[in-house]
Image: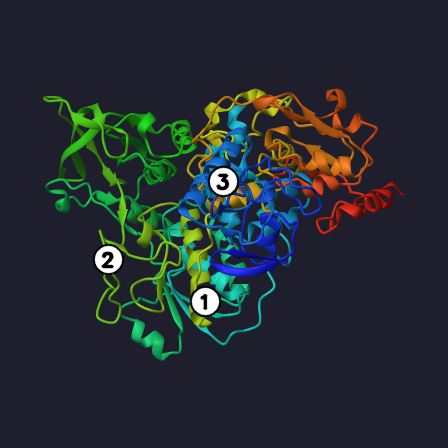
Amino acid sequence: MLTITINEKQYQVAPGQTVLDACRANGAYIPTLCNDPRLNPFGSCLICRVEIEGQRGTPLACGTYVSDGMVIRTDSKQIAEARKTCLELLTSQHYGDCTAPCEIECPAHMDVQGYIKLIAEGKFDEAVRLMKETNPLPVVCGRICTRPCEKKCRRNSLEGPLGIAYLKRYASDKDLAKKQPYLPEKKTATGKKAAIIGAGPAGLSAAWFLAELGHEVTIFDRQEAGGGMLRYGIPSYRMPRETLDAEIDIIKSLGVTIQYDVHFGSDITVDSLKADGYDSILLAVGSQLGWPLGLDGEENCSNVQIGVDFLGSVTRGTQVNLTGKKVAVVGGGNTAMDCARTSVRLGANVDIIYRRTIAEMPADDMEIEEAELEHVRFHILTNPTAVEQKGDTVHLEVTKMELGEPDASGRRRPQAIAGSEYVVEYDYVISAIGQTQDLSFIGSDCNIAIHRDLMVTDTHSMATNIAGIFAAGDAVSGPQTAILAIAGGKKAAIAMDKYMCGEVFTPEPELYNHLRAKTNDEIDPANWGDCEKIEKTPMPMLTEKQRALNFDEVELGFSDEEAKKEASRCLACSCADAKECKLREYATDYNADQFALAGEQSLYDIDKSHTFIVRDRNKCITCGRCVQICTEAGAGTLGFVGRGFDVTIEPAFHRPFGEDKSCINCGLCVSTCPTGALVPRDDITLPTTAYTDLEDVKITEIKDAVEQAKK
């Protein structure tokens, strides 16, 4: 036996071992991509760097054999930098998306590609089940989500994005129509109680996940019905109230109790909730206070309304009569579009006044287009400067604007044109320029840290500065989107569960995500080979005439055929092996940057000619493991072709993989590939051969495995 030192500890090892084998046998971590215990050392990936006393630099552990008295170090700054450089070389030539950009961009990180694939296969129940692992309000989000996922859809590099929200709505509507919509299996009751303040998207989301984890959950809300801004800030022609109620009822059927007309800070307090036995509290109060125009004399104008107050009054049926009236809506966001389109339905003639151009409007393009269709007039590069009510009319002074240099948001700053002021008379003016939150409940027993009128929380756990009190939603992020609030509710629920169970909360590590390119504009459409261009399936909608003077839902939903057609457009751009990919694992560990050493890349068509295997040379790092193991197996199907950076791994004579008769479908190449360059097909039933449980097979057993596969 030989005596060696690994990280300052001595070990007895047998001669003839590599440093890699000796270190691993004694619990010392060394990353490697080209090493397979079944194969001889190859040394192609170069990342198994170590330091050996008396040797220069960082030699390869897989190519160095132990000797008596050897002193080895497996972790140092120099080693980490060397490994990172090697990983950045490998990632610079690796091409593909670890995770679909749509999933990355979704604040809740929904498995978009997964549920779309299930919809395409007609597996609607399974699709809803997958959706609700991250989002318990897919019926809502399928209607009102701002669709950040679609903006990142790789299909944009062809003809346009997938209708992701439409498909989400389709599957969740089918589930909603069932006698018993999907409910997850609840864990055993914990005996713990959680109180949630606010029945908006953040509160409802947290309630779902807490109830699923076995806790007793009660939501307290000051309104007369649930949904928060989903009900009181979004018109019913976009979010029908009966549909919203039905989705809330599903959450209640999981065991969640909702108490309405309860004001936090007066009817209930932190102290009273603790006295009632609640073990944790979530503040999900939302941003339900609208901003006034901020003009002198505005407080004396009874016919100037706040946008969110106006929308709430319509929900409650207490709005003013707008039939034949002339209405100005000030603002360019989605709330402004909602106020304008709502006023049209109430019989008004509507102008939108916005200080920038339509191109700078923060509202969704689709909302702007729908407002134009419904004859809302846009007065762009126009800004209110004064307001006065004279009798029943409002005299609104406005000035013309021009765009100057970009401001902090990146948009060009509007500036007034001197002498361009003029006055317009309106019956009503609606301010839709922003929202804030009512934090009047902050006090002695709820002394939450506040910064810029927002509650301060830990980014990962949503915990506040007070133990047992968490916060999520718009009152933390500022007025944002429903899906961001839903994501915040889930994060809070996970941390609350740990807190109530006396466990330490540990955030999930942020994984390395390889990208085809930073933006879709940088992707060559040839990337998708012979993929047919198929235009996005349009959503069936009410005609302009059918919308007149009513709040019927405008979007009518997909048919089965339309949904399957749209789902089939998905490019399935994420990697099938991302969860097991060793390149991704090590790139995460060493914080590798795929663009640090980026250069010219070759683009290869994906080879699907094989009956059981998909071969993607774009993801191949030429580690050589598949070549070695195929040769050891006696097949010799794969080999190296070319030299230097142009080397690739190919079947003989560059034939399609499936046409090489030497391949005997043993699956050993799939079992050894570390990156997803070789994966089983998912569109057929695989044979029960050697595709799984082969990683522990020894070299001497490989041929036996091959013979068994032949049979």
Report the side of 67 relative to 386 (left or right): right
Of discs 1 and 3, which sits in the foreground?
A: 3
Pointers 1 and 2 in contact (CB under 8 A)?
no
Q: Earlier in the sequence, mark 1 or mark 2?
A: 2
Q: Nearer the viewer, residue 243 or 709?
A: 709
Per the image, label 1 sits on a secondary structure element best described as helix
Mark 1 crowd level (few <14, some 14–19, many ≥20, 10 Å Cα): some
Quarter of the rendering containing residue 703: top right
* x, y percent for residue 673: 66, 40
* x, y percent for residue 179: 64, 57
Of discs 1 and 2, which sits in the foreground?
A: 1
Per the image, label 2 sits on a secondary structure element best described as strand
Q: Nearer the viewer, residue 239 or 381?
A: 381
Mark 3 crowd level (few <14, some 14–19, many ≥20, 10 Å Cα): some
Mark 1 lies on residue: 498
Residue lying at the far right of the rendered structure: 711
Quarter of the rendering containing residue 272: bottom left
Q: What amino acid does circle 1 point to?
A: Lys
